[in-house]
C-alpha cells in the first residue's frame, strides 16, 4: 500500500512513484490510501489503472482534505491485511495508524529526523526545504534510497474505453483545446473575464476549434463567463462544470485535447499525466518542472492578476500547429 497526502493534484504528483513501487510487488499492483479517495478511486480504481488494485478513502468528509482519525485509519488498514506501507507524505497520524494496524513493513521519511521516529521500520531523514513540489521531491529521495526505479516525467495514465465512449459528443478528429478553469484556492484562479478573452483570441486563430471547459461545480461561474463573453458557438463548448462529470470521464475528455491551458491545478497535472502539453499559469506558487510537457506562464507580481492574456496566448501559439 502507498499513502499520499493532500488533494487530487498532490496525489497525481506520485503517479510515477506508484508505478515504480507497483513494479516491485508480486502482482505488480498497489493499493493507494489518500484523503480524497473518492475522486482518485473514480480515476484509478476498478481496473481503470493496471497498477492499482484499490483506493482507500481516509477522510470522513470527501469534499475536502481535512484531518483523519487515527483509529479509523488503523481499522481500515487492519481490515486490508497489508504487509507493507510506503508513506509518501510526512503524516505522523497515518504512520502511527499503520503501526497500530500491525503492518510489518512501514516505510517513510521524516523531515530533519524529527517526526515519526518510532513509527517506521525504515525511515529516511529529509530536509525541510526541497525543490518544489516538495512532496514529490521528498518521495523521490525516499525511493532512490531504496533503489526503487521510477520516472515521474514519463508517467502516463490511459483513459478506459468506457470513459472514452462518453466523449462522443466531440466529433472524431476535432481540434479540442482544454481551458483549465479549476483552481484549488481563489488565489490560483485567473478568472472568467480573462479566460473568455483567451477563448475568443484562440477561436479567431483557429475557427474550427472546440473548447473543453475543465473544472467542477465550484468553478461553474467562471465557465458561465466564458460561454457568455467569448463569442464561441455554444455547440463548440463542452462544459464539464455543470454536469457532475466523474474524474475518469473528465480524464477521457482531456485525452482528446491537443493542449491544456489553465490554472496551476489538478487539471494541469492530469493533462501532463495524459501526455498533453499544459500551458500552466503560475501566480503565487513557483512553476512546476517535473515534466517537459509543462509550459509555464509566470506572473509579473506573484499573483494571477500579473498574467496577461497576451502572455498566455504566446505560450499557446507554438502548440496550435
Image (tube, rainbow, N blue to C red):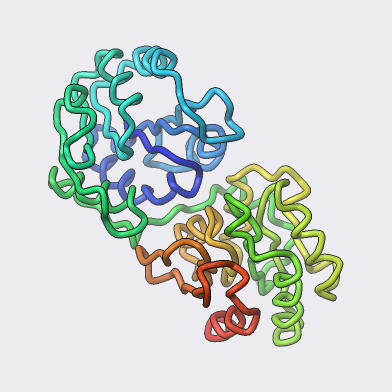
* Placement of 255 over or under 197, stated as above or below: above
Task: Report whether residue 321 is seen.
Answer: no
Q: Is residue 231 left or right of residue 11?
A: right
The image quadrant where one finds the N terminus is: top left
In percent of width and height, residue 5 lies at 41, 38
In percent of width and height, residue 232 lies at 82, 74
Q: Is residue 221 left or right of residue 45?
A: right
In percent of width and height, residue 110 lies at 22, 37
At 58% from the left edge and 59% from the top edge, which residue is drawn?
A: 188
In percent of width and height, residue 317 lies at 58, 85
Q: Is residue 204 left or right of residue 254?
A: right
The image quadrant where one finds the C terminus is: bottom right
At 16% from the left edge and 37% from the top edge, which residue is drawn?
A: 113
At 40% from the left edge and 42% from the top edge, which residue is drawn?
A: 50
Q: Nearer the viewer, residue 161 or 83?
A: 83
At 58% from the left edge and 26% from the top edge, which residue is drawn?
A: 61
* Placement of 139 over or under 304, stated as above or below: above
Amino acid at each position: 500500500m502507498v499513502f499520499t497526502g493532500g488533494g487530487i493534484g498532490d496525489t497525481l504528483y506520485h503517479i510515477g512513484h506508484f508505478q515504480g513501487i507497483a513494479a516491485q510487488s508480486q502482482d505488480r499492483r498497489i493499493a493507494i490510501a489518500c484523503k480524497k479517495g473518492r475522486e482518485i478511486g473514480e480515476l484509478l480504481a476498478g481496473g481503470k489503472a493496471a497498477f492499482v488494485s484499490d483506493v482507500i478513502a481516509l477522510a470522513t468528509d470527501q469534499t475536502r482534505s481535512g484531518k483523519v482519525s487515527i483509529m479509523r485509519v488503523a481499522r481500515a488498514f487492519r481490515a486490508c491485511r497489508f504487509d507493507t506501507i510506503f508513506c509518501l507524505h510526512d503524516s505522523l497520524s497515518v504512520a502511527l495508524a499503520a503501526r497500530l494496524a500491525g503492518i510489518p513493513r512501514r516505510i517513510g521519511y521524516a523531515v530533519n529526523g524529527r517526526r515519526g521516529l518510532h513509527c517506521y521500520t525504515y525511515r529516511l531523514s529529509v530536509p525541510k526545504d526541497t525543490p518544489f513540489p516538495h512532496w514529490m521531491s521528498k518521495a523521490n529521495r525516499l525511493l532512490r534510497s531504496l533503489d526503487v526505479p521510477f520516472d515521474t516525467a514519463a508517467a502516463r495514465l490511459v483513459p478506459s474505453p468506457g470513459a472514452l465512449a462518453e466523449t462522443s459528443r466531440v466529433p472524431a478528429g476535432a481540434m479540442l483545446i482544454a481551458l483549465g478553469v479549476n483552481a484549488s484556492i481563489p488565489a490560483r484562479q485567473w478568472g472568467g473575464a480573462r479566460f473568455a478573452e483567451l477563448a475568443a483570441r484562440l477561436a479567431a486563430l483557429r475557427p474550427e476549434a472546440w473548447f473543453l471547459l475543465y473544472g467542477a461545480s465550484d468553478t461553474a461561474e467562471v465557465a458561465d463567463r466564458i460561454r457568455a463573453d467569448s463569442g464561441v458557438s455554444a455547440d463548440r463548448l463542452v462544459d464539464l462544470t455543470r454536469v457532475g462529470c466523474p474524474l475518469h470521464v473528465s480524464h477521457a475528455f482531456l485525452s482528446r485535447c491537443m493542449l491544456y491551458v489553465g490554472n496551476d491545478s489538478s487539471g494541469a497535472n492530469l493533462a501532463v499525466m495524459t501526455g498533453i502539453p499544459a500551458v500552466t499559469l503560475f501566480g503565487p506558487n513557483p512553476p512546476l518542472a517535473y515534466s517537459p510537457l509543462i509550459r509555464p506562464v509566470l506572473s509579473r507580481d506573484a499573483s494571477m492578476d500579473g498574467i496577461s492574456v497576451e502572455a498566455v496566448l504566446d505560450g499557446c501559439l507554438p502548440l496550435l500547429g
